[in-house]
Image: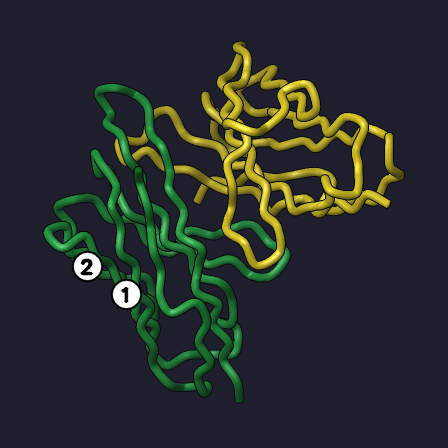
Amino acid sequence: GAVVSQHPSRVICKSGTSVKIECRSLDFQATTMFWYRQFPKQSLMLMATSNEGSKATYEQGVEKDKFLINHASLTLSTLTVTSAHPEDSSFYICSARTSHSTKETQYFGPGTRLLVL
Amino acid sequence: KNQVEQSPQSLIILEGKNCTLQCNYTVSPFSNLRWYKQDTGRGPVSLTIMTFSENTKSNGRYTATLDADTKQSSLHITASQLSDSASYICVVSAGSSGAGSYQLTFGKGTKLSVIP
């Protein structure tokens, strides 16, 4: 199946710093990528949807100035958590959707564990 | 409002036993239903995906069923193994290829623990 990678797999940072997470579709072109956040024992919560070459669409309650998303190419999307605070500590998962599949398939990355001290 | 409900929330079974996880949904317009396995600290991995016309799909020891009339799905795991311990998430996709837009609704998952 298609592969989606994320980097880094885990990151620890100090409060107030910014952290960038990369999401790459390794063997297919993804016109749309999604960013999710998952707190312990909770389901994935969609943060934003990004289409290549256009601005991301954020879900209600997600601050677009805090969670900067750049979808510069068909294989790369980045999420930057700006001025991170301890409450931003979470598991961030991206997914990528293929553009040619009639079944509209999404593939998830392995996730990035963020810990803000 | 689109919703996906899963039951049970958690389940403990002995290695080698079978189990069935349930998923009820109210999603419109229905596109497809997927079951994912999520190991702790990892991203979800797709097990099965079913469209409206498919009522059963197997992937090794995993068999998913779909009843589009009652809007219910189940995931049956046979001869469970310790490595099956994970969260199993039911995800329903709403939308249409014509519109070109889809929205996923996630269940909260069933946490399965397989013990020796």
The residue carrying mark 2 is B56
- Mark 2 belongs to which amino acid? Thr
Is residue A19 found left or right of A56 in the rendered image? right
Q: Nearer the viewer, residue A1 or A104?
A: A104
As drawn, A94 above or below A73: below
Could you say whether the residue bearing mark 2 is in a helix, strand or loop? strand
Q: Position of residue A18 (x, y in %)?
A: 81, 28
Q: Which mark is residue B63?
A: 1
- The quadrant of the rendering that contains the N terminus of chain B is top left
Q: Colour of chain A?
A: yellow
Q: Residues within 10 Å of mark 2 (few under 14, many from 20)?
A: some
Q: Nearer the viewer, residue B60 or B97?
A: B97
Q: In the image, what residue occupies the spot 58% across and 47% down?
A: A38
Q: Colour of chain B?
A: green
As drawn, B90 above or below A18: below
Q: CA distance from mark 2 to mark 1?
A: 7 Å
Contact, CB < 8 Å: mark 2 with mark 1?
Answer: yes
Res A17 quadrant in image = top right
Tell me, yes or no, whether dots 2 and 1 are on the same chain: yes
- The disc, 2 or 1, on the residue closer to the chain's N-terminal end is 2
Q: In the image, what residue occupies the spot 49% across and 25% down?
A: A49
Q: Position of residue A60 (x, y in %)?
A: 51, 27
Q: In the image, what residue occupies the spot 43% across and 45% down?
A: A1
Q: Position of residue B94 (x, y in %)?
A: 28, 35
Q: Position of residue B87 (x, y in %)?
A: 49, 63
